[in-house]
């Protein structure tokens, strides 16, 4: 089970960032009975180095985005090479909050190529803004996946983590998160869509995680009945007590 804490811009205090890292370290140190647990913390960029430096624990550090650039005269841009150099392993790409600021599918795909070429793991966010009775949202989702994964090499595609994050479920209350049954259907649909891009035998290797109002109350049933390989957790990952409860609920 892969749990990624997407801190967004919630965490602004380095002391809090360190507290959250300590909580995560304790959680990965406890051996659970169930599936292997992998925790990734994705802090705001200024905290990446601080959390990575000297981190010998099993907690991985992730970036919330990177630039398309591979370096050079690009003021304000952050290259994959730079985040790799400080020990970052995962990079979230195409989050709906970045897409809302104009990020295109083409740009997400270029970033994913850079991330993969440096040996890091891209976590590509996809998800519809709303649901309609005609199920157009399924086409939206399929098109998003094809646009980002299509330009990658076939063997690179299976290394991408797909984060299914329906925009309508992000940043709400647990009551507004997706139901486990609907999530399960979406995971099956995503695997089916991957059939156009990934060799049949490799489809089950692609990790599909869910994000959108996951908390310590709903994570267990979503994990049990949703068919996912993990979660991308926003707000609930920024409080050490809640994050601990959430991991314990799913362990
Ligand atoms: P949320 O955010 O858990 O606060 O809904 C999830 C996400 O946007 O990654």
Image (spheres, helix red, strand yellow):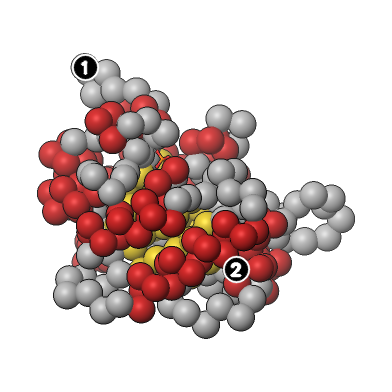
State whether residue 56 is above or below residue 222.
below
Q: Residue at x 64, y 53 (%)?
A: 13
Mark 2 or mark 1, which has the lower sequence index?
2
Q: Residue at x 36, y 78 (%)?
A: 29
State whether residue 193 is above or below residue 114.
above
Report x, y in % for residue 24: 42, 67
> Relative to 141, is 227 on the left or the right?
left
Residue found at the far right of this picture: 73
Report x, y in % for residue 196: 30, 50
- Badge 2: how crowded within 10 Å, few (<14), some, or many (20+)? many
> Relative to 43, is 175 on the left or the right?
left
Q: Name the quadrant containing residue 215.
A: top left
Asked if disc 1 is less than 8 Å from ligand 1, the answer is no
Which disc number belongs to residue 133?
A: 1
Report x, y in % for residue 161: 39, 58
Compare residues 67 and 89 and report the one nearer the observer. Answer: 89
Q: Name the quadrant containing residue 87.
A: bottom right
Q: In which quadrant of the rendered image does the N terminus lie?
A: bottom left
Compare residues 133 and 210 and report the one nearer the observer. Answer: 210
Which disc number belongs to residue 99?
A: none
Task: Residue under label 2, please give it.
Answer: 51
Label 2, secondary structure: give it. helix
The span from disc 2 to disc 1 (Cα, nearest Å) is 45 Å
Number of the front mark, 2 or 1:
2
Report x, y in % for residue 105: 53, 40
Q: Residue at x 43, y 66 (%)?
A: 23
Residue found at the far top of this picture: 133
> Relative to 188, is 230 on the left or the right?
right
């Amino acid at each position: 089970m892969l749990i990624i804490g997407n801190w967004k811009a919630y965490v602004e205090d380095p002391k809090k960032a360190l507290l959250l890292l300590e909580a995560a370290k304790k959680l990965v140190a406890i051996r659970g009975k169930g599936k292997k647990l992998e925790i990734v913390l994705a802090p705001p960029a200024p905290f990446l180095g601080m959390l990575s430096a000297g981190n010998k624990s099993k907690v991985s550090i992730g970036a919330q985005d990177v630039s398309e650039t591979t370096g050079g005269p690009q003021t304000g841009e952050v290259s994959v090479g730079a985040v790799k150099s400080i020990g970052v392993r995962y990079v979230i790409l195409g989050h709906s909050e970045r897409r809302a600021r104009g990020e295109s599918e083409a740009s997400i795909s270029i970033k994913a190529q850079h991330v993969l070429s440096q040996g890091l793991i891209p976590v590509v966010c996809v998800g519809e803004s709303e649901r309609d009775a005609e199920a157009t949202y399924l086409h939206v989702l399929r098109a998003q996946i094809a646009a980002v994964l299509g330009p990658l090499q076939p063997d690179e595609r299976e290394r991408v983590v797909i984060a299914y994050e329906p925009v309508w479920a992000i940043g709400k209350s647990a009551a507004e998160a997706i139901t486990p049954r609907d999530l399960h259907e979406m995971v099956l649909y995503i695997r089916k869509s991957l059939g156009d891009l990934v060799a049949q035998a490799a489809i089950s290797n692609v990790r599909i995680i869910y994000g959108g109002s996951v908390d310590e109350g709903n994570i267990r049933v979503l994990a049990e009945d949703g068919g996912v390989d993990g979660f991308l957790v926003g707000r609930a990952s920024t409080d050490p007590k809640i994050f601990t409860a959430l991991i314990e609920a799913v362990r």
